[in-house]
Image (spheres, rainbow, N blue to C red):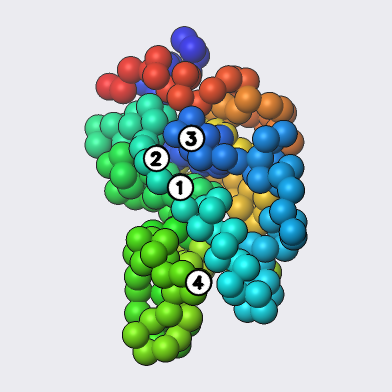
Amino acid sequence: MKTLQQIFDESKRIVFFGGAGVSTESGIPDFRSKDGLYNQTYDYPPETILSHTFFMNKTEEFYRFYRDKMLIDGIAPNIAHIKLAEAEEKGKLTGVITQNIDGLHQKAGSKRVYELHGSVHRNYCTRCGKFYGAEYIKSSIPLPVCECGGIVKPDVVLYEEGLDDNTVNGAINAIRSADAMIIAGTSLNVYPAAGLLNYFQGKYIVLINRDETPFDSKADLVIHDSIGKVLKEIVIR
């Protein structure tokens, strides 16, 4: 913790790269842990349901799963989200790059957030492009239909779909210009997102994760613990 505090104190352009482990402390389940979505039983594997092909061919079944597992009520930012927003407000943090789609970083007050996999809070008509909020998706059963008659789709990156170019370019620029990068709550097994870390040219790489990752050997500091527990102890100054 002393070393991490020194890195925070010394660094002026910190970028944060986070995954599902950042949000699990807010009560949102991850995908790959023993209790994650990939280890639960459904009529179809979650990887299949959350694919572009499944959305197009079995839209009603997609939305049954999506409402049940991806739209979670009563969630709030945890101490990790709050600390990162504080670091940005005080000029220490230049950007948050997240693989999560829950919008909790923005809810905590972060302004520069690059949502690699989109957001459940944005949904658009596949015909006319009109946007709708998450509440519309929750209440429109069995299918959310636009006033023009088109099907409304979540603005999230499904399997078989590519990442948004503008979001990726923004994330790359934030990583390239950072003097320190904190990676947390991610297995670093999801590509192309994990590949963005290779653009870092700064001084310090800090990795905070409950389990080991393929990137541990490249980090200057590795902490196997809860991201919230760790960041709670850091003084932002």
Give the camera-side residue of 1 and 145.
145
For badge 3, the amino acid type reads: Gly
Place of residue 125 in the rendered image (x, y in percent of width and height, measured from the top left) = 42, 80
Estimate how packed mark 2 is, as few (under 14), some (14 to 19) or many (20 or more) residues with alpha carbons within 10 Å. Answer: some
Proximity of marks 2 and 1: CB atoms separated by less than 8 Å: yes
Mark earlier in primary sequence (4, 1): 1
The span from disc 4 to disc 1 (Cα, nearest Å) is 18 Å
The span from disc 3 to disc 2 (Cα, nearest Å) is 7 Å
**Residue bearing the label numbered 2:** 75
Q: Give the residue displayed 60% in from the left and 28% down from the top.
A: 209
Proximity of marks 3 and 2: CB atoms separated by less than 8 Å: yes
For badge 4, the amino acid type reads: Pro
**Residue bearing the label numbered 3:** 27
Place of residue 57 in the rendered image (x, y in percent of width and height, measured from the top left) = 67, 79
Q: Nearer the viewer, mark 4 or mark 1?
A: 4
For badge 2, the amino acid type reads: Ile
Estimate how packed mark 4 is, as few (under 14), some (14 to 19) or many (20 or more) residues with alpha carbons within 10 Å. Answer: few
The span from disc 4 to disc 3 (Cα, nearest Å) is 26 Å
